[in-house]
Image (tube, grey):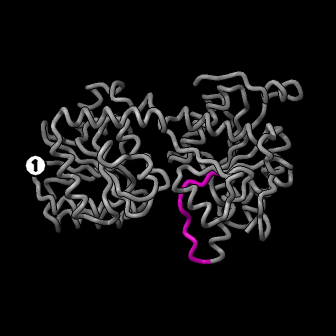
Amino acid sequence: METRPDPIISRAAAERGPPTVLQVLPALESGGVERGTVDVAKALVAAGWRALVASSGGPLVRELERAGGEHVTLPLASKNPLVIRANVGRLADLIEARGVDLVHARSRAPAWSALAAARRSGRPLVTTVHALYHHRTGLKRRYNSVMARGDRVIAISQFIAEYVRQIYHVDESRLRVVPRGIDLGRFDPKQVSAERMIQLARKWRLTDGMPVVMLPGRLSRYKGQALLLEALSLLGRGDIRCLLVGPPQGRGGYRRKLERLVVARGLESVVQLTDHCSDMPAAYMLADVVVSASIVPEGFGRIIVEAQAMGRPTIATGHGAARETLVPGETGWLTPPDDAQALAAALDCALALDAPAREALAARAMPRVRASFSTETMCARTLDVYRELLDGERGAPGPSQAPAPGGPVP
């Protein structure tokens, strides 16, 4: 990642070394939030800052440490109020011991601890809102509200920004939109060898020349696998293969429901549930059409962006951030939520594309993704948010003085 001279580093280094940013989240597993945390830590190190991450651990710790970041293991995945309170002291001690200049909280339970610790230590707090939070009760809404209490509140899409404005009344002086980014070095058709594609095709027993429809994502009713099965039934084609690519993550009951639905719709020769895939770039290259059929609005929708980056015809549900990441009629198709008939029609159109039409679609989609949704762009904008607070420009509020009715911990 390209670096640039940083006046904040020069000033801080003369006093006590480069700035230190502490990112706080439940664990470093393999999700989008965790991936973004590691990406930002890498960018911090590349820019000459110190990158510290506190979580309960996970497989991405090794990658973080290889990049020059430091991990501190704390029980931040717990939602137990007593543990959340105890984590306030643990984080405050960590902030003082490591000379942390800024705290960035990425999830609700650890954000309560981070908010109180940042206040106690007089450090600025950044929060990132990644999704819509359900708030059926007043207590739940208050629990969620911690993500709107940072000195800067990052929304991962314009859709999420509008949600934060309307529900939590965050004003523009504190709100910043930083779309998620994907690794364009990894999600690049030129980087996927024929050997990788052949290996995966053999594993999945794909038939040469048979069109492939793919829906990547964990098995969850919210991801719309059942809706896609309904659309395939309406499409009525037996000469295609549909791959549902994603782990059940403890949802064995939903997987069994999908298997029963496949049988009920007569789709046994069409649909295959493939579980986890460790080589998604190669998987995308095997697909003739990629579908994101979410029945609830996505805060960002990484699959939609990855598929377009790989030049694949992409169909997405027309709500949430999909309306920002895909241009209907130009880079793919948007269909109404929970509408199997419309999804079947879009599948018919996408499968009917000839080679020149597919190439033209890719030629429009790929540059747009590269210009707007790269990891580098996401990290650069995040570091700019940090600089705003550390540099004290734009009339920023004092450290952790964002409205916090009701106290720091639920």
Secondary structure mostly taken by the magenta-highlighted segment of the chain: loop
In the picture of the structure, the residue carrying the numbered disc 1 is: 239
Residue at 62% in and 46% down: 57
Q: How many marks?
A: 1
Residue at 37% in and 57% down: 318
In the rendered image of this protein, does residue 325 appear above or below residue 195?
below
Q: Quadrant of the C terminus?
A: bottom right
**Where is residue 204 drawn, in percent x and y?**
23, 42
Q: Quadrant of the N terminus?
A: top right
Q: Is residue 297 part of the magenta span, yes or no?
A: no
Tell me if 172 is positioned left or right of 377 in this view: right
**Where is residue 170 drawn, in percent x and y?**
67, 60
Front residue of this view, candidates 253 and 304: 304
Front residue of this view, candidates 264 and 311: 311
Residue type, label 1:
Asp
Tell me if 237 is positioned left or right of 167 in this view: left
Front residue of this view, candidates 160 and 240: 160
Tell me if 74 is positioned left or right of 90 in this view: left
Residue extent of the magenta highlight: 128-137
Q: Secondary structure at mark 1?
A: loop
In the rendered image of this protein, does residue 314 appear above or below residue 267?
above
Residue furthest right in the image: 15
**Where is residue 393 drawn, in percent x and y?**
79, 40
Residue at 36% in and 25% down: 191
Neighbour tally class for label 1: few under 14, some 14-19, many 20 plus, Cα within 10 Å: few
Q: Quadrant of residue 206?
A: top left
Residue at 62% in and 72% down: 140
**Where is residue 192 drawn, in percent x and y?**
33, 27
Q: Quadrant of residue 341?
A: bottom left
In the rendered image of this protein, does residue 28 appear above or below residue 226?
above
Front residue of this view, candidates 161 and 271: 161
